[in-house]
């Protein structure tokens, strides 16, 4: 939650003296205050700025305060509303509370009485906002833990995140669908100094072509058919924070030109308005398309590409970092079965390691969620996996006595086994083994030494499984 969060207070009363008194009290509490002389005027105010607190008179012309209470709760359920009246009855007070009113105050009231009610309402608003922020933060942290692994490529991504998290530098994230581009964008935002500011994600490919400009930049009431009220755009919603433009390559050329101007001038113009609005946002864009090919084809503007591509972060496909699968597996098991100590059978693990994962990390997550739902015990076996994984399985090599070797389920043991089998497949070629495992040569040599693996034969010393006490 933003440290300089100010309560927005709307007072609704047909008596100007009451409105002035309440505004003076609200400003004394540090609120951002506005006023309306009728319910209709109050609803008009809410079209452009939703208040956190509404204090309304019960008796208003045309539409009563009780009617306004219902309208406010429909439009903005989190807005706290208090009713005030000089003709209060127990029945009307009970009805107001049933409709969701925070409090019912009778006129005349003292300044201290009004001040106390507003303070209590503001405290509730802040507590709810803080709760929602903490929930979002916990959920985000759980997701960000999935950007993990020991492979060289993912370690480079993590290093870039650490360098970019406190900067305002535009970032372009590339990678196949399902590699976790939005997770990286969220990590850059939430792991740095921007964490308490807005993060707005926009799927450019899902926007209706005729409404893209309105969605991004906002619009004025009556600017087009269906624009029944003014609306702030997503860039304004992200003010002070980060806007994440996913699938940026899907934007049409005319919208690319308008986006470029907005980024260059740091201002936007809502549809139907003659006024320009200043914006202060950090832009992170992502695409699964080859934008350089799009540049050559003329479907993506070169100037916008260079404006966005100040720092590029490339996410490798999962098939190029299979050594990270055991770690990702544990993350997803902790998410979908947090209270259960689930294990994966050796044959199921080999299916996971041998599959090419065209859907990348997203497909792996879906696979684990399915397995957790279909399992019959605390063990996830091959029958719990999708048919595509079972069909891709290759038989394990038998030992000299014709027995299928046992595959351990501890993550370190699985990593040791994976490295051994890769060396068997490449006949001890360290360069090729490193590429298949997705790790650097230095990391490969460190793991060979750690697990006592004979790189020539790909076979470790007998009975020398790594212990949990072994350190990197």
Image: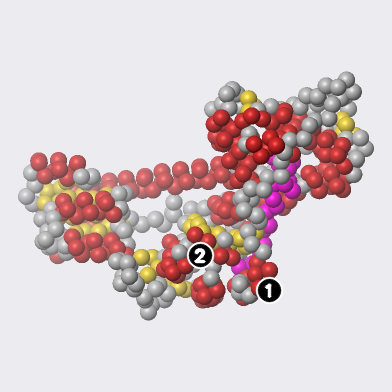
Residue 405 or residue 96, whichever sits in front: 405
Q: What element carries label 2?
A: loop
- Which disc is residue 296 wearing? 1
Relative height, residue 96 to residue 72 (above, below):
above
Q: Is residue 149 magenta?
A: no
- Residue 446 in picture, x, y percent from top left: 83, 40
Measured from the top left, where is residue 63 in percent x and y? 14, 58
Q: Is residue 236 visible?
A: no
In the rendered view, does 4 fall on the left or right side of 11? Answer: right
Check if mark 1's residue and mark 2's residue have beta carbons within 8 Å.
no
**Nearest the camera: 91 or 415?**
415
- SS for tag 1? helix
316 is within the stretch colored magenta:
yes
Q: In which quarter of the image is residue 346?
A: top right
* Residue found at x 41% / y 43%: 131
| Part of the protein shown in magenta | 307-325
For the residue pair 94 and 173, the one nearer the viewer reads as 173
Residue at the (29%, 54%) spot, across then down: 75
Report whether 422 appears left or right of 149. Answer: right
Q: Residue at x 23, y 57 (%)?
A: 25
Q: To which residue does mark 2 refer?
A: 281
| Residue 87 percent coordinates (x, y) | 6, 50
Q: Which residue lies furthest to the right in this view?
A: 456
Q: Quadrant of the C terminus?
A: top right
How far from the left and from the top, in percent, is residue 200? 48, 58
Discs 1/2, front: 1
């Amino acid at each position: 939650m933003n440290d300089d969060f100010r309560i927005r207070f709307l007072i609704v009363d047909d008596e100007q003296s009451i409105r002035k008194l309440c505004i003076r009290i609200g400003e004394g509490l540090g609120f951002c205050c506005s006023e309306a002389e009728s319910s209709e005027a109050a609803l008009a105010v809410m079209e452009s700025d939703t208040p956190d607190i509404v204090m309304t008179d019960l008796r208003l012309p045309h539409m009563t305060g009780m009617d306004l209470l219902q309208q406010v709760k429909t439009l903005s359920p989190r807005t706290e509303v208090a009713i005030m009246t000089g003709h209060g009855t127990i029945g009307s007070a009970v009805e107001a509370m049933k409709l969701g009113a925070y409090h019912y105050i009778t006129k005349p009231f003292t300044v201290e009485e009004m001040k106390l009610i507003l303070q209590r309402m503001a405290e509730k608003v802040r507590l709810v906002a803080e709760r929602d922020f903490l929930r979002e933060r916990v959920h985000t942290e759980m997701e960000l833990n999935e950007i993990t692994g020991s492979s060289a490529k993912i370690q480079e991504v993590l290093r870039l995140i650490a360098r970019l998290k406190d900067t305002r530098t535009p970032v372009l994230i590339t990678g196949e669908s399902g590699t976790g581009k939005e997770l990286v964008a969220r990590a850059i935002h939430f792991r740095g100094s921007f964490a308490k500011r807005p993060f707005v994600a926009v799927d450019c490919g899902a926007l209706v072509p005729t409404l893209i400009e309105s969605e991004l930049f906002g619009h004025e009431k009556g600017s087009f058919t269906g624009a029944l009220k003014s609306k702030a755009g997503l860039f304004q919603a992200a003010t002070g924070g980060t806007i994440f433009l996913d699938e940026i390559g899907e934007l049409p050329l005319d919208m690319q030109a308008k986006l470029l101007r907005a980024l260059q001038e740091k201002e936007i113009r809502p549809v139907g308005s003659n006024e320009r609005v200043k914006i202060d946002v950090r832009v992170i864009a992502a695409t699964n398309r080859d934008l350089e090919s799009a540049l050559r084809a003329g479907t993506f503007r070169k100037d916008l590409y260079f404006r966005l591509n100040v720092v590029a972060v490339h996410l490798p496909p999962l098939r190029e970092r299979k050594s990270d699968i055991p770690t990702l597996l544990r993350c997803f098991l902790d998410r979908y079965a947090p209270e259960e100590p689930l294990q994966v059978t050796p044959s199921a693990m080999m299916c996971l390691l041998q599959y090419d994962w065209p859907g990348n990390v997203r497909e792996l997550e879906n696979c684990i969620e399915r397995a957790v739902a279909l399992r019959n015990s605390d063990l996830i076996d091959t029958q719990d996996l999708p048919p595509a994984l079972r069909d891709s399985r290759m038989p394990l090599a038998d030992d000299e006595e014709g027995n299928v070797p046992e595959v351990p389920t501890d993550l370190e043991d699985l990593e040791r086994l994976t490295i051994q089998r890769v060396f068997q497949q490449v006949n001890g070629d360290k360069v090729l083994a490193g590429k298949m495992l997705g790790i650097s040569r230095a990391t490969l040599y460190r793991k060979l030494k750690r697990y006592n693996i004979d790189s020539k034969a790909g076979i470790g010393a007998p009975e020398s499984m790594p212990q949990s006490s072994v350190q990197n």
